[in-house]
Image (tube, rainbow, N blue to C red):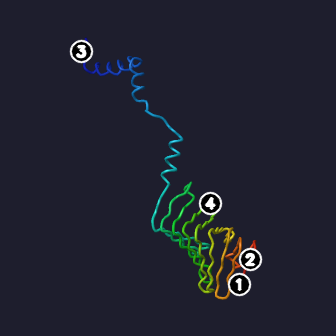
């Protein structure tokens, strides 16, 4: 028989390799990963993991290093995608350089990050405090790229010396110009 233990150490690895075809299949099956990669489940997990609901939210926007919008909401959450924010009880303040701020309130709002589009819904009130003007509407859109406030429905503006009722209104925030597309009624 084998008289030297050193020779025995060489026989063990050679025996394991020689018997490999007998045990290799069982070892491979045992070590194979269970489950599989499910792309749909992975995408759903990533989409779900980016959803949020927050209370007492403050959002600020800057243009050329100057803070232009401050938006406070009692609650904010993601919309259909993580690039859309839904807000409840919105108070917004628009600051334009060398002019008085414009205060805007509404019950609900949405902000689309991709096209920088703010939508305010339900009981929208815009207040220009130095001009003592207030505007009332049910829906208001603000497009940051064009600096336009658009109210597609009925609009009512009250000032110290006039009351105005009209249809669709476009307001250019950068120039302060109004444009009404439907019938306008003014009481001086």
Q: Answer above or below: position of 76 versus 67.
A: above
Q: Nearer the viewer, mark 3 or mark 4?
A: 4
Q: Can residue 147 be seen in the rendering of this structure?
A: no
Residue at the disc numbered 1: 187
Residue at the disc numbered 2: 184
Residue at the disc numbered 3: 3
Q: Answer above or below: position of 10 versus 41.
A: above
What SS does tag 3 mark? Answer: loop
What SS does tag 1 mark? Answer: strand
Residue at the disc numbered 4: 114
Q: CA distance from mark 3 to mark 4?
A: 81 Å
Q: Can residue 37 be seen in the rendering of this structure?
A: yes
Q: CA distance from mark 1 to mark 2?
A: 10 Å
**Most distant residue in the top direction:** 1
- Looking at the picture, how far across and down is residue 159, in whole percent? 64, 85
Name the one closer to the observer, 85 or 17: 85
Q: Nearer the viewer, mark 1 or mark 3?
A: 1
Dot 1 or dot 4, earlier in sequence: 4
Left or right of 75, for residue 30: left
- Looking at the picture, how far across and down is residue 164, in whole percent? 69, 80
Residues at badges 4 and 2 in contact (C-beta under 8 Å)?
Answer: no
Which residue shows up at 62% across the image and 75% down it?
Answer: 136
């Amino acid at each position: 028989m084998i008289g030297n233990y050193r020779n025995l150490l060489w026989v063990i690895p050679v025996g394991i390799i020689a018997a490999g075809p007998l045990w290799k299949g069982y070892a491979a099956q045992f070590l194979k990963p269970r489950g599989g990669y499910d792309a749909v489940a992975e995408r759903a997990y990533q989409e779900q993991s980016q959803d949020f609901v927050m209370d007492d939210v403050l959002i600020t926007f800057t243009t050329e290093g100057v803070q232009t919008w401050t938006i406070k909401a009692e609650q904010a959450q993601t919309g259909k995608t993580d690039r859309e924010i839904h807000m409840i009880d919105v108070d917004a303040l628009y600051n334009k350089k060398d002019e008085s701020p414009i205060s805007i309130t509404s019950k609900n709002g949405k902000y689309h990050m991709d096209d920088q589009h703010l939508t305010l819904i339900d009981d929208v009130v815009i207040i220009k405090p130095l001009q003592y003007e207030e505007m009332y509407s049910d829906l208001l859109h603000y497009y940051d790229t064009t600096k336009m406030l658009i109210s597609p429905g009925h609009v009512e503006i009250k000032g110290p010396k006039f009351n105005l009722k009209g249809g669709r209104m476009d307001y250019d925030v950068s120039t302060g110009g109004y444009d009404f597309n439907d019938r306008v009624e003014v009481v001086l």
